[in-house]
Amino acid sequence: MGRQGSPVSDASGCLTGRVEVDFLVFHKSKCVILEVDGQHHNEGSQTSRDYVRDRVLLREGIPTVRFTANECFERTSDVVTEFLNIF
């Protein structure tokens, strides 16, 4: 990342730098990003950066699945089950 929290891509949308994710999960020969979105994800600039990063990674074949922090804390088992069922 050029700046923390900012995806780095060129004009064609390809990654040109390092990207930070919450969890990079490898399961059943697949790779998926798990993001836990807290309050800061409600801020416009953070949301925009997240959307750009998600699209860039999806073009590379790595989808992103998002849950709210509230969901993860209150329904941990359900979130894990739902996430793993995506595979």
Image: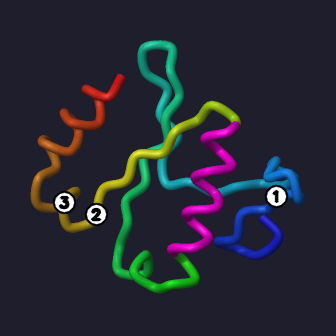
Secondary-structure class at tag 1 = loop
Image side of residue 30 versus residue 75, left or right: right
Residue 1 appears at what percent x and percent y? 77, 64
For disc 2, the marked residue is 68
Residue 49 is one of the magenta-drawn residues? yes
**28 horizontally vs 3: left or right:** left
Cβ–Cβ under 8 Å for marks 1 and 2: no
Q: Position of residue 34 (x, y in %)?
A: 42, 46
Percent position of residue 48, x then y: 57, 73
Q: Tell me the amino acid under the disc marked 1.
A: Ser
Residue 77 percent location from the top left of the image: 13, 42
Bin the neighbour count of mark 2 within 10 Å (Cα to Cα): few under 14, some 14-19, many 20 and up.
some
Residue type for callout 3: Glu
Q: Which residue is mark 3?
A: 71
Q: Amino acid at mark 2?
A: Thr
Query: Helix, strand, or loop for circle 3?
Result: helix
* Circle 1 or circle 2, nearest the eye: 1
Q: Residue at x 47, y 34 (%)?
A: 25
Q: Secondary structure at mark 2?
A: strand
Residue appearing at x 53%, y 28% in the figure:
31
Q: Which residue is mark 1?
A: 9
Mark 1 and mark 2: span between their CA atoms? Answer: 26 Å
Q: Measuring 35% from the left and 80% from the top, which residue is drawn there? A: 39
Task: Give the mark nearer the N terminus: 1 vs 2.
Answer: 1
Residue 87 lies left or right of residue 52; in this view the side is left
Main secondary structure of the magenta stretch: helix
Q: What are the residue bounds of the magenta stretch?
A: 47-59
The local crowd at label 3, few if under 14, some if 14 to 19, many if 20 or more residues have their Cα within 10 Å, is some
Residue 55 drawn above or below residue 60: below
The residue positioned 51% from the left and 84% from the top of the image is 44
| Number of numbered callouts drawn | 3
Q: How far apart, in angstroms, are the residues tagged by discs 2 and 3?
A: 5 Å
